[in-house]
Image: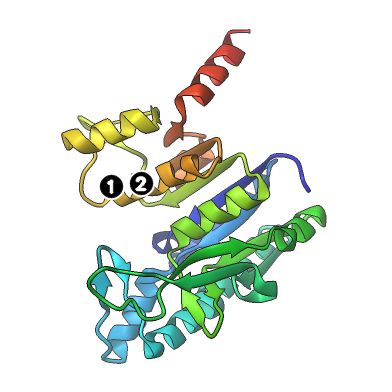
Amino acid sequence: MAGRITVVKVSGHCLDDDALLRQFAGIVARSDEALVIVHGGGKEISDLQQKLNIEPRYVDGLRVTDAGSLALVEMVLCGSVNKRLVRYLLAAGVDAQGLSGVDRGLVRARPMRHESIDMGYTGEVASVRREVIADLLERGVTPVIAPVSVGKSSNFNLNADPVAGAIAAAIGAWSVIFVSNVAGVLADGKRIASLTSGQALDLIGSGVIHGGMIPKVRAALDVLSSGVPQAVITDLDGWAAQGGTTFLEANVERTLKGEACQ
């Protein structure tokens, strides 16, 4: 497989704006690392649901996916969003290939269980077929992955964050970068450059990390717990400047500091 690999999860906030798509594609084109891209698209799914008079339903921030909504999810994520992103990457000179978790059985899914509600066709990662991505990276191709995945008797709609983390762990990636519309974790209006998992949990407990930042941070911590050395929360400008908030396990942080002093 290629050398150092980074998985980039890009949120739907960046995927329906021409300027942001061009910026994203340009950053990918200039990268000297092998990249695997996983994308969301929840905003466009909800917009289409509302146009069709289907009320989006959420539990604990997760979309409840009935059979009708699954068809829309597949159409939006595997179709319009995925192919739009690939088109911009190709225009920037990136040899990109779009696929979903269904293709070649890349991501196997199981139904998500919830204590109080049937989540329908919302799923969670059961396994990742590593060689699918390895084959593409060895050919210099950048995979662009929609998080719709395959189950035993149906496809499932998965949240893109855990899909990115599971893929990163399976392929031995160095980092997962979560790119959205937030520059990183803020304290007193200032961005925190780096956090260990323990520090991040303390900041959640004290209320410094709150609201919509909590699930972003928990997704980053899940990446660390899966064995990936680091995770980053940032926006496009921060990614280009190697900014954002970097999450490291304490032993990794000590190692990097030691290397910097040599």
- Report the quarter where the C terminus lies: top right
Q: Amino acid at mark 1?
A: Ile
Image coordinates of residue 154 in percent, x first then y, are 52, 84
Mark 1 and 2 residues: CB-CB less than 8 Å, in contact?
yes
Q: How was the colour assigned to the protein in this rendering? A: rainbow
Query: Which of the pair 11/73 is nearer the observer?
Result: 73
Residue 194 is tagged as none
Disc 1 element: helix
Q: Is residue 217 above or below residue 151?
A: above
Query: Which of the pair 37/124 is nearer the observer?
Result: 124
Image coordinates of residue 222 in percent, x first then y, are 43, 46
Mark 2: few/some/many CA within 10 Å (<14, 14-19, 20+): some
The answer to whether residue 222 is left or right of residue 115 is right
Image coordinates of residue 163 in percent, x first then y, are 51, 60
Marks 1 and 2, how far apart at CA: 6 Å
Residue located at (68% from left, 64% from top): 90
Residue located at (27% from left, 79% from top): 56
The answer to whether residue 215 is left or right of residue 27 is left
Query: Which of the pair 170/34 is nearer the observer?
Result: 170
Q: Which residue is mark 1?
A: 214
Residue 12, quarter of the rendered image: bottom left
Image coordinates of residue 16 in percent, x first then y, are 44, 68
Residue 218 is tagged as 2
Residue located at (77% from left, 46% from top): 2
Q: Amino acid at mark 2?
A: Arg
> Extreme top residue here?
262
Disc 2 element: helix
